[in-house]
């Protein structure tokens, strides 16, 4: 059984056929999905809750994407606290730093990320971290304010951050990017990382893995990423599925069993 640790099922691109998408995932032996609670901005962070309530194998999170950091006001942190008490909310995020798009000023992104890390400590909930072109600042913030566990999702960073993440007990999650021919450093990390330290995800509707590249991504395609990593490590896809599902459960144990 597979676990898609990171999906955006609230995305409008699923409005026409969300139930069929979930059915295809189930038919592809995906038995757990976490849909991310960011929505189109901080006021929509509860977007995953109705989807999780309607499907007992779907979980969610709440938080503010770094793209939306400049829209944050104090009451949004209260909203994270309030919504995270929901039994299907497994984590805080995704949050983090995106210096590739720079949709919000970097100092604001850092402050919003820091507040999520503090909430992770306070609420004892793991954090889902998005980081792009910001390895150094991500590592520094994680050192200053270590969260209560978590994952660096859609990992595209270098070996140094990968190493630091594992040292502080974070997991790394691989998306379809690892299947792209240019992702050689990433493939190397996926080949060598200990089997109890990583997850797989789609980050759908974005980033469909080979052989679906360019299509709308969906949770069923997490199987292609798992298969690719299995080939890299010269083991069966079943073992990847088993290990990544066990890692997900261990990381989010308090609420996902
Ligand atoms: Zn992300
Ligand atoms: Zn995402």
Image (tube, rainbow, N blue to C red):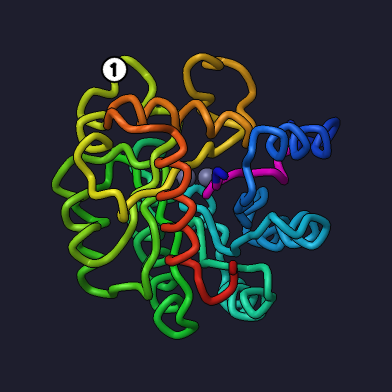
* Quadrant of res 19: top right
192 left or right of 1 in image: left
**Does residue 5 lie above or below 254 as drawn?**
above
* Residue in the image at 39% along x and 46% along y: 173
**Does residue 15 lie above or below 67 as drawn?**
above
Place of residue 64 in the rendered image (x, y in percent of width and height, measured from the top left): 54, 59
* Residue in the image at 52% along x and 49% along y: 5
Place of residue 47 in the rendered image (x, y in percent of width and height, measured from the top left): 73, 56
> Is 105 or 27 nearer to us in this picture?
27
Q: Which residues are magenta?
A: 3-11
* Residue in the image at 28% along x and 27% along y: 232
Whether residue 95 is visible, yes or no, is no
Q: Is mark 1 within 8 Å of ligand 1?
A: no
Place of residue 134 in the rendered image (x, y in percent of width and height, measured from the top left): 27, 46
Q: Which residue is mark 1?
A: 182
**Does residue 86 lie above or below 193 as drawn?**
below
* Residue in the image at 38% along x and 23% along y: 179
How busy is the neighbourhood of tag 1: few (under 14 within 10 Å), some, or many (20 plus)?
few
184 left or right of 121 in image: left
* Callout count: 1
Residue 10 lies within the magenta run: yes
């Amino acid at each position: 059984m597979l676990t898609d640790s990171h999906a955006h099922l609230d995305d409008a691109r699923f409005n026409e056929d969300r139930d069929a998408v979930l059915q295809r995932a189930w038919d592809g032996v995906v038995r757990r999905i976490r849909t991310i609670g960011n929505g189109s901005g901080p006021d929509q962070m509860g977007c995953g809750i109705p989807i999780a309530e309607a499907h007992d194998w779907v979980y969610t999170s709440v938080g503010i994407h770094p793209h939306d950091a400049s829209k944050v006001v104090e009451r949004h942190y209260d909203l994270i606290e309030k919504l995270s008490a929901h039994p299907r909310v497994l984590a805080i995020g995704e949050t983090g730093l995106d210096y590739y798009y720079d949709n919000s000023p970097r100092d604001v992104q850092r402050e919003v990320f820091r507040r999520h890390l503090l909430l992770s400590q306070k609420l004892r909930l793991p954090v889902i971290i998005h980081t792009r072109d910001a390895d150094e600042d991500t590592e520094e913030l994680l050192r200053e304010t270590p969260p209560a566990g978590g994952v660096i999702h859609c990992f595209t960073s270098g070996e140094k951050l990968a190493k630091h993440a594992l040292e502080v007990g974070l997991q790394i999650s691989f998306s379809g990017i690892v299947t792209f021919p240019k992702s050689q450093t990433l493939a190397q990390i996926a080949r060598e990382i200990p089997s109890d330290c990583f997850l797989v995800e789609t980050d759908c509707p974005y980033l469909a893995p080979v052989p679906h590249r360019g299509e709308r991504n969906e949770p069923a395609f997490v199987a292609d990423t798992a298969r690719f990593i299995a080939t890299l490590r010269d083991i069966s896809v079943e073992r990847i599925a088993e290990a990544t599902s066990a890692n997900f459960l261990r990381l989010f144990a308090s609420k996902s069993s």
